[in-house]
Amino acid sequence: MKKILSLLAAGALLFAACYKDATETPTKSITFSCSGDWMQNTKDLTANGSAMTDVWVFDYVDNTLVQTIHQDDNTAADFGSPSIDLSFGTHTLYFVASRGLTPTVNTTAHTITWVKPYDTFHKALTLTVDNTTGSQAVTLERMVGKLKMTINDAIATGTTQFIVTPATWYYGMDYTDGSPTASASNQAITISCPSNYVGESGKYLTVFTFSSSAQWHTNVTLAASNGTNTISSVTISNVPFQRNRSTEYSGNLFTNNGSSTLTLNDTWSDPITGTW
């Protein structure tokens, strides 16, 4: 009887092991090479000469987040080309590459918010994984709009910083569809003025906002400051913004000549131009 029980126990263990092997979902490591016309090369992930600093991949199965990959070392050999173990079946993957400052990820709300937005790119990809699935090339698309302001007259003595205050600005995005989030009203964006800019004309500054594909407008105030008091300021009304478009204004900040210019930047799609 003892021998029979031992055989039965061994059989049960063997069955359990076989059952476990049969029910485990197989996985495969897939390498994703992030690229696009905006990059100089895949490893450096640079857009218009500026390197990306963060890459995220959010992996969803049946609308449930199963893993998040975050690369924040843009000197690593695999930066922008992560290899990810994916279970067999259908995955929805959301890719984000950015050089924004101080990102905060909220996977419950599926958002990323930056203290200061800069160039950011996004792509959603649905992929069915099996034994035949190979490496994937992913082209990300720009999710921000840019405002470039060129100061035509000489920067006044004592100027140490510029303060850009938009009536409405977007500091984040929904990483599932790229839509803008984290709106703020009249929140100042401070940009230091290098000392060698003082007395120079034709200097410019740029700020980025997350944007939708539909054009929207807001008022923007540009001020020069000595760190304590405002030296001069100008408000530009109804400035247009749109995803992947550069809005470029120029005019005098320190001497008012009543003119402004809107110009085209053709390195972005269908940019907008204007004057203050």
Image: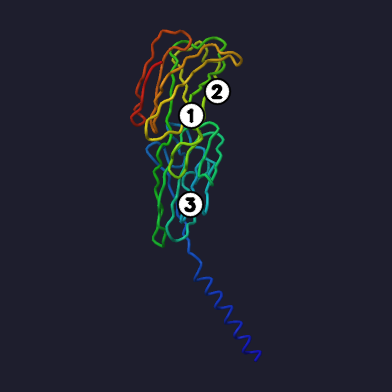
Category of crowding for the residue at label 2, using alpha-carbon neighbours closer than 10 angstroms: few (below 14), some (14–19), many (at least 20): some
Give how far apart the Cα atoms at labels 2 and 3 are.
36 Å
**Three-letter amino acid code of the residue under disc 2:** Thr
Image x and y of residue 108, in percent:
54, 47
- Residue 59's disc number: 3
- Residue 169's disc number: 1
* C-beta proximity under 8 Å, tags 1 and 3: no
Give how far apart the Cα atoms at labels 2 and 1 are.
14 Å
Residue nearest the viewer, comparing 87 with 46? 87
Dot placed on the residue nearer the N-terminal end, 2 or 3: 3
* Quadrant in the picture for residue 265: top left
Residue shown at 49%/64% (left/top)? 25
Category of crowding for the residue at label 3, using alpha-carbon neighbours closer than 10 angstroms: few (below 14), some (14–19), many (at least 20): many
Residue nearest the viewer, comparing 133 with 40? 133
Between circles 2 and 1, the one closer to the viewer is 1
Dot placed on the residue nearer the N-terminal end, 1 or 3: 3
Residue shown at 56%/39% (left/top)? 104
Residue nearest the viewer, comparing 275 with 186? 186
**Three-letter amino acid code of the residue under disc 1:** Trp
Between circles 1 and 3, the one closer to the viewer is 1
- Residue 190's disc number: 2
Q: Secondary structure at mark 3?
A: strand
Quarter containing the C terminus: top left
Q: Secondary structure at mark 1?
A: strand
Image x and y of residue 55, in percent:
50, 42
Dot placed on the residue nearer the N-terminal end, 2 or 1: 1
* C-beta proximity under 8 Å, tags 2 and 1: no
Residue shown at 63%/87% (left/top)? 5
Quarter containing the N terminus: bottom right
When the figure is inspected, residue 63 is found, relative to residue 154, above or below; the finding is below
Give how far apart the Cα atoms at labels 1 and 3 are.
29 Å
